Amino acid sequence: MEKEIDILEFTDELGPEKILEVYDPKTGMRGFTVIDNTALGPAKGGIRMTSSVDVKEVFRLARAMTLKCSLAGLPFGGGKSGIIFDSKKDKDKKNDFIRAFSRAIKPICPSQYVSAPDINTSEKEMEIFVKENGYFNSATGKPLSFCRKRLFRKKVCGLPHELGSTGYGVAHSTEVALKHMKIPINQATVAIEGFGNVGTFTFKKLEEMGAKIVAVSDSKGVLYNPNGLKYHEVMKVKMEKGSVVFGDGKKLEGKKIFELSVDVLIPAALPDVINKSNMNKVKARIIVEAANIPMPLDIEEKLSKRILIIPDFVANAGGVISSYAEYIGKGPEYMHELVKRKLHENTDLVLRHAFEKKITPRKAGMEIALARVKRAMERRNSR
């Protein structure tokens, strides 16, 4: 924020179309929104609140949303927002910052940009944002209890990420990957790094599908049991004792989860957990990237020669698909069916394209997503 933003630092054939920098003198709120591309529809992306967020970070995230929405087959473009927020110094100002930011970007929201939760924002902040903006569809990821007035006798409510759409989608993407590798899901062994929102719902759904979850981790370490873990037992231990490592199994050091001999490894928490130091120790046959950027792209390229890797923007698209269901006024049941259908279709499409052209799934997904955006831009320019 110290120097003037130069949009030419970021421009390429897709965008960004707009970079909006805002400041509120009363609260001291400083933030920005990047609208990368709107050829397919209004830009979709969350509001990130951290002390270090900057325009470059937000632009990269906005571009990722352009590709994710395109590949998911949604009528959304890509965007993202950031609010500079010190969780200690500005703790009491958080709601005021959200209100000020909502007012500041109202000229483009929801006409050109639709917000959502991200780091340090949740369904609570989305409710505050929407109330200040005045338009119910200015944000998705709102509380299930937050509804607008009945429209043609129909009650329209929020669909929070706490319903588990991302993890639910990861499980379905995993199911497709297993089919391509000819591994029956009821014979598959799975290790999940992370037991937060995404990890827990991935665990729960895969268990329902018949997979054997043999390892799960949190910040305290790994719980490993080759005979399989049960979701309700692990969740109970986590709630009562604060960590999964106190469950029925062997406790391992956190990094050991990446070295287990399993059919599927699902990194569902932190970035860059698979790197130069451990890439040669990974024994999984399939990696499904539930987290964003769980490994550097050059590492992913190398590992793809011996492991089937479902890239993040394919596997974790359940959240933005849920956002679309909420955007068009649908409920949880419709959302879950939509996530299931789209994750099956899109994962299968990407893998077929990759195998046919003998390229990595990431390259295949990028080719499909970019082609869709460029076709939409051509149609828009020919009007």
Image: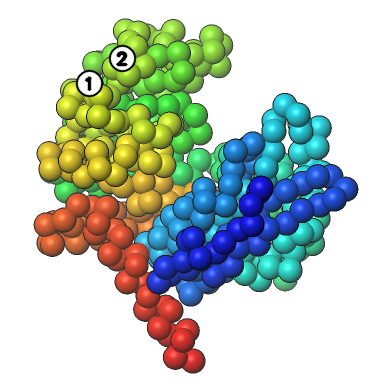
Left or right of residue 284, residue 197 in this image:
right
Left or right of residue 108, residue 183 in this image:
left
Q: Which mark is residue 224?
A: 2
Q: Report the amino acid beneath label 1.
A: Leu
The answer to whether the residue labelled 1 contacts the one labelled 2, judged by CB atoms less than 8 Å apart, is yes
Q: Nearer the viewer, mark 1 or mark 2?
A: 1
Q: Secondary structure at mark 1?
A: loop
Residue 290, x across and y down, in percent: 38, 40
Residue 199, x across and y down, in percent: 43, 31
Q: In the orientation shown, which residue stands out farthest toward the right? A: 26
The part of the image, by quadrant, that contains residue 163 is: top right
Q: In the orientation shown, which residue stands out farthest toward the front? A: 3
Q: Which residue is more in the foreground, 19 or 179?
A: 19
Whichever of callouts 1 and 2 sits on the residue coming sooner in the sequence is 2
What residue sits 17% from the left and 41% below the top? 302
Q: Is residue 335 at all visible to an observer of this figure? A: no
**Which residue is denoted by mark 1 in the rendering?**
260
Q: Secondary structure at mark 2?
A: strand
Q: Is residue 307 above or below residue 275?
A: below
